[in-house]
Image (cartoon, helix red, strand yellow):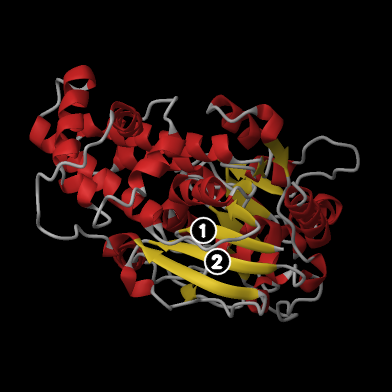
Amino acid sequence: MKICIVAEGSYPYITGGVSSWIHTLVSSMPEHQFIIYAIGAEERYRGQFRYKLPENVEQVVEVFLDSFHLDGKRWGRSLKMNKEEREALKALIAGEEETDWERVFRTLRDARWRTSTEFLMSRDYFDLLSELCRERFEQLPFTEMFWTVRSMLLPLVQLIRHPLPQADLYHAVSTGYAGVIASLGKHLYGKPMLLTEHGIYSREREEEIIKADWVKGYFKDLWIRYFYGLSRCAYGYADRVVTLFQRNREIQAELGCPESKIMIIPNGIKVDDYLNLPGKDGDAKTINIGAIVRVVPIKDIKTMLYAFAAVKREVPQATFTIMGSCDEEPEYYQECLELVKMLEIADLAFTGSINVKQVLGRMDVIVLTSISEGQPLAVLEAMAAAKPVVATDVGNCRELLYGSGQEGDTGRAGIIVPVLDDAEIARAIISLCRNSVARQAMGLNGRRRVMYAYTHDQFTDRYESLYRSLGLK
């Protein structure tokens, strides 16, 4: 079977999280051929793969959002769009629930356009946006609306018109642009579509837009509705929708995904790889605290640093090791370094991208302070290595550390703390630093839980079965 995996902002350019998940999935299924349709943010990442691609990856299609620009200079051409086409595009812009995506795809890919962005320079675009503003957005300045919507639509128009390889199945690993492109694959070739959501993409974009200063307040709602509209496209086209845990399933249903489509397949990990990791020296007096995390804002490294500073005051023998890429958000990384200096934190190291298994065995406590997560592989790695975890109450962290209450489950594997609360995070870390018995017990509980419910074999068997069932359609 030939499977096209559509990924946005992750594999193969960024390590960890969703990227590791994709790499594991592809590597574990050598009997299938894979196409990676990679949607990246910046052209500078072209060809900069952070993974050695498995042999069963036959093609990587790279598309970068910052490389899109308007083709040509001719304004005001009439494309003679009919009423149905105009209504479909107006619904797309307004983020309406009943957007006719079949017509959107046909319209945006129409051969009568001589260039990929000619619609955005046409009289038709100006007229339909004018009409939409009179109907729905009369209070917004039209000139700002014109440019805002054009910048909003440009990546989508370009992506929809970009060549899409044929495959037997299209598998999006998020909604958003990736979900739309996988939906387009089903539209063009009549092949099944699968959607896996690790986090809830539309909710994450909403949080970003609310905080963003690149969009004015009165346009934030327009952008938010737009991204929710993209998610509904993927929910509508998908034959099956996979989520990682029950709470996400409930959110997907709330956002309009038919419950009959949704199934839960947790992440899995090769537990045996974490059983005999290099440990601390026998006479080591330090308490080693670590974080398996990319240095990016959504992981909230700054709150972690404030917490570590408080821990160091109470536990002078503590060390801190932040294991993960530092080059995705250089400005944020620099801000973190400046914060370390300001707080005068000693015995702290940013390692950059490393083989975590070489360091994880020497850790006593693992910390995750993310603002948003799905079912973090970093927590599963720590649990497999029998390390207790202090994690914020996001995504599936509570169930991972405290259990689901199902038969065969084990006790607590760590401590859940509030988001952005460095004082509470510090208190939890300090309590574990001072209690070696609790650290050992929680670590063993975590390993047992992973072995019971989150193994690599369980994960791959479920996806193999799902691929085959969809491929028979």
* Disc 1 secondary structure class: strand
The quarter of the image holding the N terminus is bottom right
Q: CA distance from mark 2 to mark 1?
A: 7 Å
Which residue has dot 2 on it?
36
Amino acid carrying mark 1 in the image = Ala
Which residue has dot 1 on it?
7
* Dot 2 and dot 1 residues touching (CB under 8 Å): yes
Percent across and percent down for residue 145 are 16, 35
User: Which residue is depicted at the point 52% across and 50% down?
Assistant: 188
* Disc 2 secondary structure class: strand
Q: Quadrant of residue 87?
A: top left
Q: From the viewer's perspective, is 158 left or right of 114?
A: right
Amino acid carrying mark 2 in the image = Ile
User: 224 or 343: which is nearer to us?
Assistant: 224
User: Which residue is depicted at the point 75% across and 67% down?
Assistant: 29
Looking at the image, residue 186 lies above or below residue 322: above
User: 218 or 390: which is nearer to us?
Assistant: 218
